[in-house]
Image: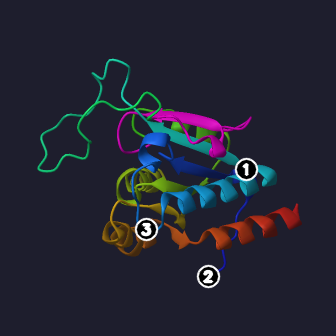
Amino acid sequence: MDLTLTPARTALVVIDLQRGIAAAPTAPHPASDVVAHAVAVALALRAAGGTVVLVHVTPSADGRDALRPQTDTSARQPGPRPTDWSEILPELGPEPGDLVITKRQWGAFYGTELDLQLRRRGIDTILLAGISTNVGVESTARDAFERGYEQVFVEDAMAARDPDEHAHTVRTLFPRIGRVRSTAEVLAALEAATRQL
């Protein structure tokens, strides 16, 4: 099915493309490709009049709001994080007009003003990208679905720590709550929309 987008009602929501997360190995797409694809979509959407939202995750300065429930497997690496761990990758921005959202957990909606800012701008469609597919991106996608947003998952602008984790989310969950497309397909849809303006 062809992808049609209305840029003024579309936001690219980039999840956790920050120094500390993008520095770790990813699959099936290397982080450098994920970032390059997210940058390409961001540039095209900005040029078409859409909204770019850059989301990064970090606990507060004192760390007391970090999640600490007991789990069988820890997702956090031991030891202190570098001081630039939560910095958004500079190639992504932010540019004037972009929104920056700081989250304290996996999903970008809970406890943030993301939903408020999207609705005040008349956004009804979200393009999702970032790391990790099955953690921050999936958590945000589930919340977005429950809030009634149309979603497009830019498959090659996201990755996980393991190729099976990425594949499972992309094949089983995302098609139930939105549409899975490549960067090339999203760029073509934005180009088509721009020609109609």
The residue depicted at 57 percent of the width and 55 percent of the height is 35
Is residue 127 at least partly visible in the picture? yes
Tag 2 secondary structure: loop
Residue 186 point in image, percent of width and height: 66, 67
The furthest residue to the top:
62
Q: Earlier in the sequence, mark 2 or mark 1?
A: 2
Q: Which residues are magenta?
A: 86-108
Q: How many marks?
A: 3
Residue 187 drawn in magenta: no
Q: Tell me the amino acid under the disc marked 3.
A: Phe
Density class for disc 2 (Cα within 10 Å; few <14, some 14-19, many ≥20) is few
Say left or right for 190 vs 163: right
Density class for disc 1 (Cα within 10 Å; few <14, some 14-19, many ≥20) is many
Mark seen at residue 1: 2
CA gap between label 2 and label 1 equals: 22 Å
Work out whether residue 135 or residue 195 is closer to the camera in this orientation and state it.
Answer: 135
Circle 3 residue: 174
Mark seen at residue 157: none
Q: Tell me the amino acid under the disc marked 2.
A: Met
Residue 119 point in image, percent of width and height: 60, 41
The residue depicted at 30 percent of the width and 23 percent of the height is 63
The residue depicted at 66 percent of the width and 40 percent of the height is 93
Q: Earlier in the sequence, mark 2 or mark 3?
A: 2
Mark seen at residue 50: 1
Tag 1 secondary structure: loop
Is residue 49 at least partly visible in the picture? no
Residue 3 point in image, percent of width and height: 66, 73
The image shows residue 161, relative to residue 8, as above or below, that is below
Q: Tell me the amino acid under the disc marked 1.
A: Gly
